[in-house]
Image (spheres, rainbow, N blue to C red):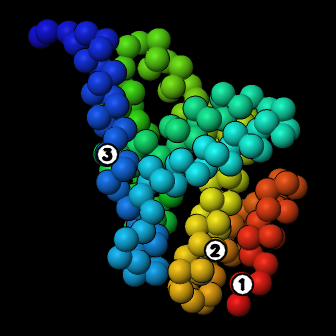
Amino acid sequence: MKLKDSTTMILDFLNTSANLKKIPRQGWIDKLNHKNPETVAEHTYLMSMMGMVFSDMDEMNTEKILKMILLHDLAESIIGDMTPEMLSEESKKTLENDAMKKILRGLPEPLYKRYKMLWDEFQANSSEESKLVHQIDKLEMALQARIYSEDGFKSEQLFPFFKTAKDTVSERRIKEMLEKIMKDID
C-alpha cells in the first residue's frame, strides 16, 4: 500500500471540506420548506465572523475559537446536516465522531492530533472557548431566522429557531445580541 504524501492528504481534506458548500441546512428545509436555504459553509462563515468579534471583544483565544468553528460541522461533509428530529443526540454524536475521525485521519499526524483535540473539546463543551462556540452556533441560527423573516417567512414558522436560541444562550453579550435580533419579530 502506497502512503499518501502530505500535499495529497491536505488536498483530499480540502476537497472533503468543500462539500459543505453544497450541503443545505436541513432545518430550514424541514421547518420552513425553504427551497434554497443557506449551506453549512455559509453558516460556518457567519459563525466565524461572530466568533472573531466576540472572542476579540472578550480577549479570548480567537485562533482556537475560529478553528473550533471551522471544525464544528465538518462531519456533515460526509454525513449531511441532520436535525434533532432525524435521530437521537447520542446516535448523532457517534455518527459525527466516526465521520470526524475518518476525515481527520487523512491529515498528517500532527494536524490530526491538533484538530482531533479541538473536536473532542468542542463535543465535550468543556472549555470557555467551546461554550462560546456552542452559543454562537445558536446565535447564527437566530440571525439567519431574522434574515428569513425579512424574506417573508412567517414568525410562527421561525418561532422554534428563536426559542431554541433563547433557551440555549446564556453568555451576556450573546444574549444581548439575541434580544436585538428577536426585537420586533411578530
Separation of residues labelled 3 and 2 (CA atoms): 26 Å
Q: Tag 1, which secondary structure? A: loop
Separation of residues labelled 1 and 3 (CA atoms): 33 Å
Contact? badges 1 and 3 (CB < 8 Å): no
Residue 93 visible in the snapshot: no
Residue position for label 3: 19
Q: Which mark is residue 146?
A: 2
The amino acid on which the numbered mark 3 sits, given as a three-letter code, is Asn
- What residue is shown at x 69% (from left), y 67% (from top)? 165
Residue position for label 1: 185
Q: Position of residue 23 (x, y in %)?
A: 35, 56
**Residue sitting at the far front:** 151
Q: Position of residue 1 (x, y in %)?
A: 12, 10
Q: Tag 3, which secondary structure? A: helix
The amino acid on which the numbered mark 1 sits, given as a three-letter code, is Ile
Quarter placement of the C terminus? bottom right
* Whether residue 122 is situated above or below residue 118 in the rendered picture: below
Say which label, 3 or 2, has the lower sequence index.
3
- What residue is shown at x 46% (from left), y 70% (from top)? 27
- What residue is shown at x 42% (from left), y 58% (from top)? 39
* Whether residue 19 is situated above or below residue 104 in the rendered picture: below
Say which label, 1 or 3, has the lower sequence index.
3
Say whether residue 131 is left or right of residue 105: right
Q: Tag 2, which secondary structure? A: helix
**Residue sitting at the far left:** 1
Say whether residue 31 is left or right of residue 21: right
